[in-house]
Amino acid sequence: MKTENIKLLMKLTANFSKHEFDSRDGSAMPADVLARIKVLAHNLQILRNHVGKSITINSGYRSPSHNKKIGGVANSQHVKGNAADIVVSGMTPKEVYLKIIDLQNKKILAPGGVGLYDTFVHFDIRGYNARFNNSTIYKS
């Protein structure tokens, strides 16, 4: 079986597979990072179930070298396996941002960071709530 097919077989939830969270530079995902990615995927599955729409992972785990190459912050939640930048089909980034915060306030989603950007939303499971708005479109 080809490596690509094996990657597709590692389902984390009903709608998310490990390969969606892999570092874009092809670096291997450490076991401790995979453990956190599984928790992140579980939370994203809850979000997907609540909105009833597909979620695309733009960026999940980032190896330290890939994170540095793309200009990510040194202590990025992506390097720890705690974060994903997402797009939800049929929803604006602001709608997704507000939905995540609502689900966190109701204790349905894990506490963590939520960042609003022009074309995506950053969601992480850092363990405490953090909010940031880096969107030029939506200023609150």
Image (spheres, helix red, strand yellow):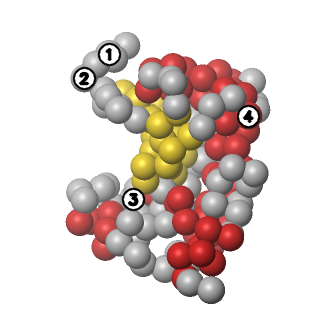
Query: Going 23% across and 66% down the picture, which residue do you hit?
Result: 69
The alpha-carbon separation of the residues under discs 1 and 3 comes to: 25 Å
Does dot 4 land on a helix, a strand or a loop? helix
Q: Amino acid at mark 1?
A: Lys
Whether residue 116 is visible here, answered yes or no, is: yes
Q: Position of residue 85 (x, y in %)?
A: 45, 45
Q: Residue at x 73, y 38 (%)?
A: 46
Quarter of the figure that contains the C terminus: top left
48 versus 66 height, above or below: above
Q: Nearer the viewer, mark 3 or mark 2?
A: 2
Query: Residue 79: where, in percent of width, then height?
Result: 45, 64
The residue carrying pointer 3 sits among few (fewer than 14), some (14 to 19) or many (20 or more) residues within 10 Å by Cα, namely few
Q: Between residue 79 and residue 60, name the one nearer to us.
A: 60
Three-letter amino acid code of the residue under disc 2: Thr
Disc 1 versus disc 3: nearer the observer: 1
Question: SS class of the residue under badge 2?
Answer: loop
Give the residue at mark 3.
75
Q: Of the two numbered discs 1 and 3 on the same chain, state the one appearing first in sequence.
A: 3
Sequence-first tag of 2 and 4: 4
Residue at x 60%, y 75% (from the top left corner): 5
Q: Quadrant of the N terminus?
A: bottom right
State the separation of the CA atoms marked 2 and 4.
Answer: 29 Å
Q: Which residue is mark 2?
A: 136
Of the pair 1 and 53, the residue shown nearer to us: 1
Q: Which residue is mark 1?
A: 139
Residue that badge 4 annotates: 49
